[in-house]
Amino acid sequence: EIQGACPDLTLLLLLIVDKGIIGAQNAAVITDTPIMTDNAAAEAYEYSQAESFKAEGNVHFQKGNLDAAIESYKSSLEILDKLDRGGVDGNSNNNNNNGIELPDPLLRPTVLSNLGLVYLKRGNGREDADACIASCSDAIDRLDAISSSSSSSPSSGGMSISDRKANLRAKALYRRARGRFASASA
């Protein structure tokens, strides 16, 4: 329910937004309140699940449960893949047309870099070294594709998106280099 808005107006606006006649951002201007469609709410939930799996992977890694960390990171990536393919209903909402705040563009590269580190730490020969290289290379490629001027994503720990991106890129490069060394030594 939209606080301060007439229930009939709210219902009408949600119907109009759902039919694609106007965008949720325009409806939010009318009501002075963000409007989230059911699909936007579902995508926000899915994204929060991806973040939760990432956090779970971090905990498993810290406890030394490397196989469980790999599974958690892979679950996070599967959800992000689903969202990239067009959201929960198959229609892409990556352009923020649905009124939800854009997710952190660094989540996927972070998960990929973390996954690379887990493969490196597990150290099951060339296979894990190659998986580390592939995961970190993917993270670097995705980081390179993210605009440094992206201002819509939240900052973390007081760092700007540019600083976070540079920090993550350095980690991924270092992890990939260590993976290449491990692969050559295997």
Image (cartoon, rainbow, N blue to C red):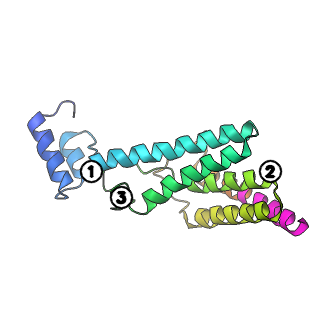
Image position of 6 with respect to 83: above or below: above
Does residue 61 appear anywhere in the picture? Answer: yes
- The stretch drawn in magenta includes residue 173: yes
Q: Residue 121 carries which label?
A: 2
Q: Is residue 137 above or below residue 5?
A: below
Tell me the element at label 3.
loop
Mark 2 vs 3, N-terminal side:
3
Q: What residue type is labelled 1?
A: Gln
- Residue 6 location (% of width, % of height): 11, 34
Q: What stretch is highlighted in magenta?
A: 172-186
Q: Can residue 165 be seen in this view?
A: no
Q: Nearest the camera: 64 or 16?
A: 64
The residue lying at 28 percent from left, 44 percent from top is 36
Query: Residue drawn at (60%, 55%), measured in percent from left and top?
Result: 162
In the image, is 62 to the left or to the right of 111?
Answer: right
- Amino acid bearing label 3: Asn
Magenta-colored stretch includes residue 162: no
Q: Distance between the residues labelled 1 and 2?
A: 45 Å
Q: Where is residue 46 in the image (x, y as percent from the top left)?
A: 43, 47
Q: How far, Cα to Cα, is label 2 from label 3? A: 36 Å
- The residue singled out by tag 3 in the image is 93
Q: Which amino acid does label 2 sit on?
A: Lys
Q: Name the residue under label 1.
A: 25
Q: Which residue is drawn at 77% across and 60% down?
A: 128
